[in-house]
Image: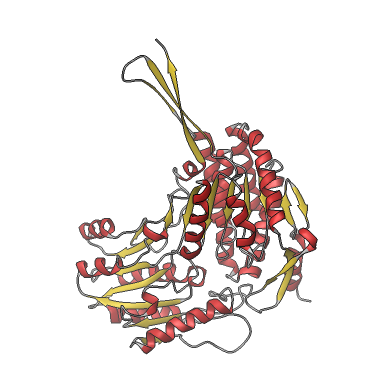
Amino acid sequence: MDQSRVDESRVIEAVEKRLFIEGKWADATRGATFDVVDPSTGEVLCAVADASPADGRAALEAAVAAQPDFARTSPRERSDMLMTAYELLMQRVDDLALLMTLEMGKPLAEARGEIAYAAEFFRHFAGEALRIDGGYQTAPAGNARFLITKQPVGPCLLITPWNFPMAMGTRKLGPAIAAGCTSVIKPAHQTPLSMLALMGILAEAGVPAGAVNCVTAMDAGGVMEPLIRSGLARKLSFTGSTRVGRILLEQCAEKVLRTSLELGGNAPFVVFEDADLDEAVTGAIAAKMRNMGEACTAANRIFVHESVIDEFGRRLAERMGALTVGRGTEPGVNVGPLIDEAGREKVRTLVADAVGRGATVLTGGEVAAGNGYFYPPTVLTGVPREAAMADQEIFGPVAPLTPFSTEEEVVRAANDTEYGLVAYVFTNDLRRALRVAESIETGMVGLNQGVVSNPAAPFGGVKQSGLGREGGAVGIDEFLETKYIGIAVS
C-alpha cells in the first residue's frame, strides 16, 4: 500500500465514530450505524453511529444539565478554551484537511484553507467572549437606574451542512461557547467525520462535559424535531436549504425558540463595461468554483454587459477549461467531485434545460465516464432569464452568463429572486458601485472581489436567505439575551 493510502487509513481510524454525549463517546441505541462514502470513488470509508430520537434526547438533557455551571464560567475561561481549540486545529491542519477531503471531496489545498478558516472563528470569538457588554443609565425621571446586562440564551441546537463540514460547525460553536451556551450539534450525514474530530479537540481544549454534545444521524428530522418541540432547548441555529429552514422555523414557533437561519442563495455576479476584465474573471472563478460551486455564496447568475460579454466569456472559459478535475487527494487537482449522484444529476438537468432554451456551451457540459460524482467546469453564455438555473441554486461548477445593457435593468434582474444572501459587483466607477451595492437586496455585497466570507464580518442574508447574522461583532449577540434591571434610588 502506498504512503497516501496509509495516511488515508490512519486519519479515518483515528476518528471516534460514536456519539459524543456528556463528555463521553457512546454507541447509538441498539448499535445502529450508517456508512460514510467517498464521493470521488463511491466507496464506503467507514460507518458511524446512527442516533435515535432517544439518543438525541440524552444529548439535549446533558446540555440542559451542564448549562447552569457553564454559564457561570468566566469570560476568560471560555476565551481560553476557544484559543486552545484554535491552536489544536492549526497544529493538525494536514490530517483534518485529509479527513475532510475524503468525506466531502474538495481538493486538499481547499480543505486546508477551510480548516484555517474554521479555526479563525474560534480565535475571533475568543476575543468576543471578553467583550460582552451591557449598560448603566439614569431613568428619565431621575428616581431609578437602569442596569443592562447580557446572559447566555441557554441550551442550543446546532445543525450544520455537508459543504463546509468544519467551518460551519465552528461558526456556530464559537459564539455559543463564547456566550456560555451549551449545545447539541448535528452534522450532515454525508460528512460527520470532521465534526466528530472537532468534538475530540474541544474536549482536549477543556470544554467541560455536557457543554458540547454531538449526534450523528441519517434521519435528521426524526432526531431533531422532538428536541425542537421538547421545550428544553432555547435556540436553534441552522445552515442549509430554504425548504428545510421553513420547516424548522415552523417547528420552532411552537416553543418560541430563538432562531438563526442561514439558508439558500441565488447570488448575482455583475460585470459592468468599465470593469477590469482580468480582475472580474478571477473574481468569477473565486465566487463560482470555491467548493466546486457547492456553496450558498456561489455566483449563480452572472450578468455581463453586452459590450464585453464575448471577451469575458472567452477568458472565463479558457481559465475554467484549464482546471484539473480529479480526486481531491491527487497532486494538481483543482476541482473535486460533487457530493453525490443526486447533486450531479441536478447540475446535469439544469445545464440541459439552459441549452435547450438557447444557451451556448463554451466549455464543459459533458460528464466523463468513470467512478465518482464528477462534473466538469462549465461555462454557458446567452443563458435566458427563463432558464431553470436562474431561479435554482446550481450547486455545481457551472457559470451561466447572461447579457445586460443598463444599470437599471441589471439591478432589477439581480433582485428578481426570493433569495438575498450575497451579490458581487465589478466596476471601476465608485458612484455606480455604491448605487448598485445599496440597491441590490442582499445581506452582503462583494465589490470587485469574489469572496466575502470572513469570521470578523457579519455573514447572513435577507428575504428567504435567512434570519440573523453569524460572525463579526454581532455574531455573539445571537446567543445572548438582554436583561434590564431597574434599581430604585429614591
Task: Name the side, left or right, on which 15 lies relative to 362.
Answer: right
Residue shown at 53%/79% (left/top)? 344
Residue 185 % position (x, y) = 62, 53
Front position in the image: 381 or 112:
381
Task: Name the side, left or right, on which 114 lies relative to 406.
Answer: right
Can residue 421 be seen in the rendering of this structure?
Answer: no
Which image quarter: residue 117? bottom right
Residue shown at 59%/38% (left/top)? 180
Q: Quadrant of the N terminus?
A: bottom right
Front position in the image: 29 or 95:
29
Residue 373 % position (x, y) = 58, 80
Residue 485 % position (x, y) = 46, 24
Q: Quadrant of the C terminus?
A: top left
Residue 330 % position (x, y) = 63, 75
Q: Is residue 377 above or below residue 451?
A: below
Which image quarter: residue 405? bottom left
Q: Residue furthest top?
A: 490
Front position in the image: 233 or 7:
233
Residue shown at 75%/66% (left/top)? 33
Front position in the image: 466 or 86:
466
Task: Name the side, left or right, on which 196 lies relative to 366.
Answer: right
How many marks overall?
A: 0
Can residue 75 be seen in the rendering of this structure?
Answer: yes
Q: Is residue 36 above or below residue 121?
A: below
In this picture the colour scheme is secondary structure
